Image (cartoon, coloured by chain):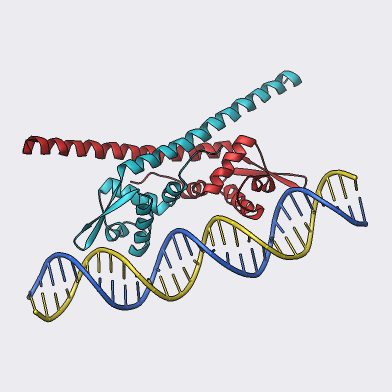
Chain colours: A red, B cyan, C yellow, D blue
DNA sequence: AACCTTTCGCAACCTTTGGTTGCACTCAAC
DNA sequence: GTTGAGTGCAACCAAAGGTTGCGAAAGGTT
């Protein structure tokens, strides 16, 4: 019954640092562990681990460039992630609406039964 | 530059178990730690801890009923969470589209410069 | 009332994950 | 070839998710 989501993908974007990293890669273009760490409140090594996580689920991929490793967002995979976000969102949204409708129905019953 | 999201709220719904719990509470109505644990792959105590987390960020609230504690979703707060999901989603979506447009522009340049 | 069952909360403990520091290696530039 | 920036690996720490074990409270049964 629960929305069919890829837990790996979700937990990858569930971390606030990783979300910010994706944000940075999208807004500033490809970057390295070092360049990203300069714009984040954690060390290069921590960033490196996060990059490994994102790489493992395919949200980003690395391109060796000399002594550097340039990471960039995999657009298709991120699009999938976005789709899952909106899927879960709309599922909950629909349920909330249904609940609200039922609540209103009950409210009406009360009103008609007990005369306000 | 990153989407303005409530990290507490995000990390609350970032956990797959907690997401499923919200799902269950929405689809089956209010439940207890015990009732939820029967439908989840973790123990009652683990569920109890998750309920505490969700309660702390206001996504659910408890109602003592005899020896039981009935938890139910706070609709307004969940609506806020859904809004944040879609906010992040659409931010990324917009950036992806922009990148795609730029990529196509570059593609066109190549085509016109190198003549195919 | 006494008893048994269910549900809960607390505490101890283990494992994974995110974070840090330290160090050795590589590649580029001088 | 030396120096400097960027990487990767390893050890170590703290917090989070999970488990078991136990004792307490509420409800049903006899």
Q: Is residue A59 visible?
A: no
Q: Nearer the viewer, residue A74 or A15?
A: A15
State the image quarter where residue A22 is shown: top right
Residue A23: % across, % down: 57, 39
Residue in the foreground of this view, choosing between A45 and C11: C11
Seen at 67% across and 21% down, the residue is B108
- Horizontal side of B76 relative to D3 (left or right) equals left
Q: In this rendering, would D19 be left or right of B28?
A: right
**Quadrant assignment for the N terminus of chain B:** top right
The image shows residue D13 at horizontal and vertical percentages of: 58, 68
Please determine whether, in this image, residue D10 is positioned above or below residue B113: below
Image vertical order of residue A11 relative to residue C4, above or below: above
Quadrant that contains the C terminus of chain B: top right
Residue closer to the observer: A64 or B25: B25
Q: Residue at x 54, y 44 (%)?
A: A19
Name the quadrant containing residue D10.
bottom right
Q: Is residue B77 above or below residue C6?
A: above
Where residue A58 appears, as percent x and y from the top left, is 57, 45
Relative horizontal placement of residue A91, taking residue B86 as reference (left or right): left
Residue A97 visible here: yes
Q: How many marks?
A: 0
Q: Is residue B96 above or below residue B105?
A: below
């Amino acid at each position: 019954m629960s929305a069919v989501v890829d837990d790996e993908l979700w937990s990858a974007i569930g971390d606030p640092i990783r979300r910010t990293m994706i944000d940075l890669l999208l807004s500033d273009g490809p970057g390295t562990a070092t360049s990203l760490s300069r714009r984040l409140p954690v060390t290069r090594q921590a960033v490196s681990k996060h990059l490994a996580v994102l790489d493992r689920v395919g949200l980003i991929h690395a391109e060796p460039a000399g002594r550097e490793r340039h990471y960039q967002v995999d657009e298709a995979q991120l699009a999938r992630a976005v789709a899952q976000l909106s899927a879960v969102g709309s599922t909950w949204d629909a349920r909330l609406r249904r609940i609200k409708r039922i609540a209103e129905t009950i409210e009406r019953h009360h009103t008609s039964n007990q005369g306000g």
